[in-house]
Amino acid sequence: MGLLRLKMSPKFQLLALLAFAIAMIFLENQIQKLEESRGKLERAIARHEVREIEQRHIQDGAKEAMVKEDDLVVIYNRVPKTASTSFTNIAYDLCNKNHYHVLHINTTKNNPVMSLQDQVRFVKNVTLWNEMKPAFYHGHVSFLDFTKFGVKKKPVYINVIRDPIERLVSYYYFLRFGDDYRPGLRRRKQGDKKTFDECVAAGGSDCAPEKLWLQIPFFCGHYSECW
């Protein structure tokens, strides 16, 4: 028995290909719309949760109408290798004398970007933890816009930056030799004796020009475009 072969004309093939392309474009457009809707819904839920907590706080009489100096919150979202440890140690040395609290922001795997749920928790803690005010928060965390969660009284952000090349060189050797703050901690590149100049000559990833950009996202924020 012979095999029956169906041969489509070039015109029909072109129409079929065109129909498939249109269908794919339509699906991609629908997926994009769903992603945008999901993002709007998550932000709306986050704002609702914060407002709900704030409303209960007002009803309990714990929040006063007038802004006091005792409510001041400062967030130092530290850029790595910009003398941030020395700067933070000054805050620890002066906290008892000047009657404020110093709190470390510790994220999972030291990720500077928090999930939306963690952002909500962080905003709640910073805004409503009156027992720890005035407060000085510090950690390697990118800027977070409190206003998008409906918070009117924003914390004060401060930071320190450094010459990009000097910062990169410092970080390069920090990964290999650590520092005096935690001398016993084994670093990721410990044992690697290659100098920074040798790394550049070899086109290594630890000294790539893209690394010079690291400071900017800490000011840009949690948006995906920043990172």
Image: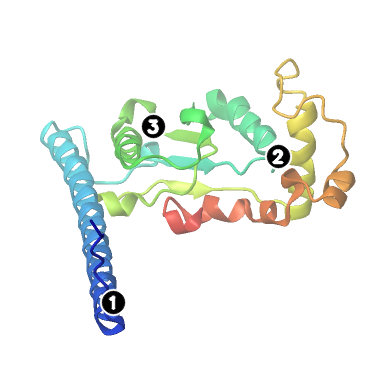
Give whichever of 160, 109 is nearer the camera: 109
Vertical relation: 202 (above or below) 29: above
How far apart are the two marked residues, 3 and 1, measured between alpha carbons?
A: 70 Å
Is residue 7 in view? yes
Q: CA distance from mark 3 to mark 2?
A: 25 Å
The foreground one among 196 and 151 is 196
Q: Which residue is mark 1?
A: 13
Q: Looking at this view, name the residue that lies furthest to the bottom.
A: 11
Horizontal placement of 220 versus 91: left or right?
Answer: left
Q: Going from the N terminus, do you reach mark 3 or mark 1 first? A: 1
Q: CA distance from mark 1 to mark 2?
A: 65 Å
Q: Residue at x 45, y 42 (%)?
A: 113
User: In the structure shown, which secondary structural element does the residue marked by tag 1 occupy?
Assistant: helix
Q: Which residue is mark 3?
A: 133
Which residue is at a point 31% across and 38% down the rendered structure image? 127
**Tag 2: amino acid:** Ala
Q: Quadrant of the N terminus?
A: bottom left
Upstream in sequence: badge 1 or badge 2 = 1
Q: Amino acid at mark 1?
A: Gln
Of the pair 124 and 36, the residue shown nearer to us: 36
Give the amino acid at mark 3: Lys
**Which of pointers 3 and 1 indicates the residue nearer the eye?**
1
On residue 83, which mark appears? 2
Please give left or right for residue 188 compared with residue 67 in the image: right
Expressed as whole percent of the image width and height from the top left, the position of residue 208 reads: 73, 52
**In terms of sequence position, does the residue under pointer 3 or pointer 2 come before the other?**
2
Q: Secondary structure at mark 2?
A: loop
